[in-house]
Image: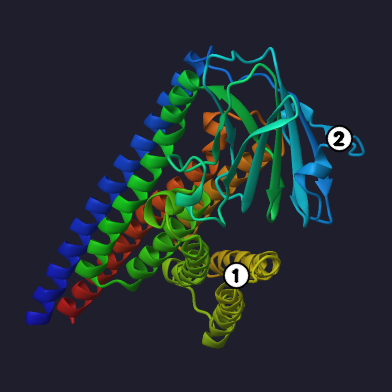
Amino acid sequence: MKNGVKKVQNGNQFSQNAKSSWIFSLTFLGSLLFLNASLLRASSQDEEMRPVPISVEYFYDDSENLKIEDMRSESITWQTAGKGQVNLGLVPGSLWAKIKLGNQINPGETYLLQFGIPGADYLDVYFYSEGQLLSWQQAGDHRPHKQWSQPWYRIPTFEVPKAERLEVYLRLDGTQKSLPLQIWAMTDFVHQIAQQELPILVYFGALTALLLYNSIMAIATRITAYFTYCLTLLGILLFQSHVTGFGGFLLWPLSAKLSDFARTIGMLLSYCSSIIFAIQLLNLSLPRYLLRSVLVYIVAIFSFYFGFLLLGSEKYIERIGFLLSFPAWMLSILFCTFIGYRQRSQMLRWFLVAWSSLLAGSAVFMLMVFGLLPRNLFTSSALLIGSAVEFILLSLALGMRINYLQNQARAEQEERIKA
């Protein structure tokens, strides 16, 4: 009799947790959709806020030996960038850019040069006027944020010296060779920051709230899927803190190494935990040795990369680690999806929709990066929106999982009463 009462109490607790999970997750999903629509409307109304029109020329130095004096010589053959955007992908070497400013700017007004990618490794910008070096400014993810020339913002930003005519030279060293350059008047830049930062802050706020809520649910219900969900979400937050530049700007401004460690630990947590979470959510029956082999493989790769981080020689190992770990993780998720379909998992539909939102957001973001879609508030935030919707839907799926456990407990209770 006591066991029967305990089962009924557990069933009621599961039902209440499921309802609260649904209400919380649906509220966040609706808030994100409303915010996205509001931001798109605000973006369309600010058509007069435009960056200064510039013409960007670039030169790819595969030797990494050319200095600023060499780049200012007439022997360099510059290429014109289409639509002001350059993207050479993950290649070694240095990428140089040159911008000439004259009638586009007002010498009495303050302008800022913005490099649109927070995760650039090393950035050096040289401002020349009439052959004289006016300013040399530095930034980059592999430099402590406090050592940046303009450390007041998470994205590399450089103040343009006041002069009638300027030649701007930018050198980019690192893994990703892309030059999303824009020059803004100070007044327009302030408005642009307000629109650019709001979705980022909402993203981190929403995922942090989801992390806290599901941590409480994990402690209350002691369902292991909640713990792996929280570990996956924590890994994503660490990784995104590196990608968006908030980690170096707010959390560790005095150390560039901590940003690399956060990225590595975040990827390791999200890869391993998401595979375990997929198995738990879909309730798959898999041989233990198969799961153990995949996890050991991923941990070994990241341990190898982490060792190179400690030694300070991670320049090319980063690409190798990504190329070896990401396919293994992606194939594991696809394999779990296939097994879930074969075993007719009840959570498969939610799982597919959640991961599809992340893939859709990633696709829109990459199309924007390669210049196939225009760069606006929606396309630049597509990856964040996709991952936020993914974790909200996975939280909903956990609520469905609780409902399933509650119904199963109730059915077992009825069978015992009849017996």
Q: Point out the image quarter for the C terminus.
A: bottom left
Q: Amino acid at mark 2?
A: Trp
Q: Amino acid at mark 1?
A: Ser
In percent of width and height, residue 316 lies at 71, 66
Asked if residue 137 lies left or right of residue 92, the reply is: left
Q: CA distance from mark 1 to mark 2?
A: 45 Å
Observer-side mark, 1 or 2, equals 2
| Residue where numbered disc 1 is placed | 332
Q: Nearer the viewer, residue 248 or 147?
A: 147
Q: Residue at x 69, y 56 (%)?
A: 175
Q: Quadrant of residue 96?
A: top right
In percent of width and height, residue 151 lies at 46, 43
Q: Residue at x 76, y 43 (%)?
A: 68
In percent of width and height, residue 34 lies at 37, 30
| Residue where numbered disc 2 is placed | 78
Asked if residue 213 lies left or right of residue 278, the reply is: left
Mark sitting on residue 156? none
Q: Nearer the viewer, residue 382 or 392?
A: 382
Q: Point out the image quarter for the N terminus.
A: bottom left
